[in-house]
């Protein structure tokens, strides 16, 4: 991996955690729309898959949030 200059003024590990947190929350929100689509189509199996996916995104976001809290003090 190449070194990338720190242009944000924020330590890379903090930025990376914030990015993971953002993307996990965004993914969970997007999958929420897919759940509605699957339910509207009457596809409970697919809706359940998306619920499980959304739960995984939430777990990831919670982990990132906890790690970030520790890094920020």
Image: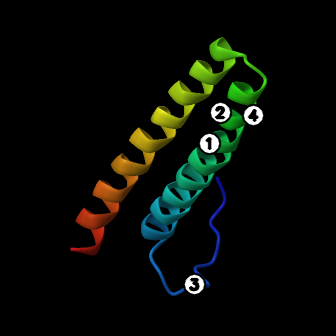
Q: What element does badge 3 sit on?
A: loop
Where residue 72 sits: x, y (%)? Answer: 28, 74
Q: Judge from the rendering whether residue 69 lies leftward or rightward of residue 52; answer left or right.
A: left
Give me the residue at 46% from left, 34% from top.
55
Give me the C-alpha separation between circle 2 and circle 1.
5 Å
Given residues 56 and 9, the one toward you in this image is 56
Do residues under tags 2 and 1 come within 8 Å of each other at their CB atoms? yes
Give me the C-alpha separation between circle 1 and circle 3.
32 Å
Determine which residue is flagged by label 1: 32
Where residue 62 sits: x, y (%)? Answer: 36, 49
Sooner in the amino-acid sequence: mark 1 or mark 3 = 3
Determine which residue is flagged by label 3: 8
Q: What element does badge 4 sit on?
A: helix
Residue 5's place in the image compared with 56, above or below, is below
Residue 61's place in the image compared with 31, above or below, is below
How many marks overall? Answer: 4
Do residues under tags 4 and 2 come within 8 Å of each other at their CB atoms? yes
Where residue 46 sits: x, y (%)? Answer: 68, 18
Give me the residue at 78% from left, 23% from top.
41
Q: What crowding class fits label 4: few (fewer than 14 Cα within 10 Å), some (14-19), or many (20 or more)?
A: some
Determine which residue is flagged by label 4: 37
Determine which residue is flagged by label 2: 35
Give me the C-alpha separation between circle 1 and circle 4.
9 Å
Occupied quadrant, residue 3: bottom right
Give me the C-alpha separation between circle 2 and circle 3.
36 Å
Q: What crowding class fits label 2: few (fewer than 14 Cα within 10 Å), some (14-19), or many (20 or more)?
A: many
């Amino acid at each position: 991996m190449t070194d990338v200059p720190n242009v944000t003024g924020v330590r890379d590990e903090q930025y990376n955690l914030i990015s993971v947190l953002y993307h996990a929350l965004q993914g969970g929100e997007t999958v929420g729309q897919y759940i509605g689509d699957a339910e509207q189509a009457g596809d409970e199996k697919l809706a359940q898959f998306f619920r499980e996916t959304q739960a995984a995104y939430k777990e990831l976001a919670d982990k990132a949030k906890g790690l970030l809290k520790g890094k920020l003090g």
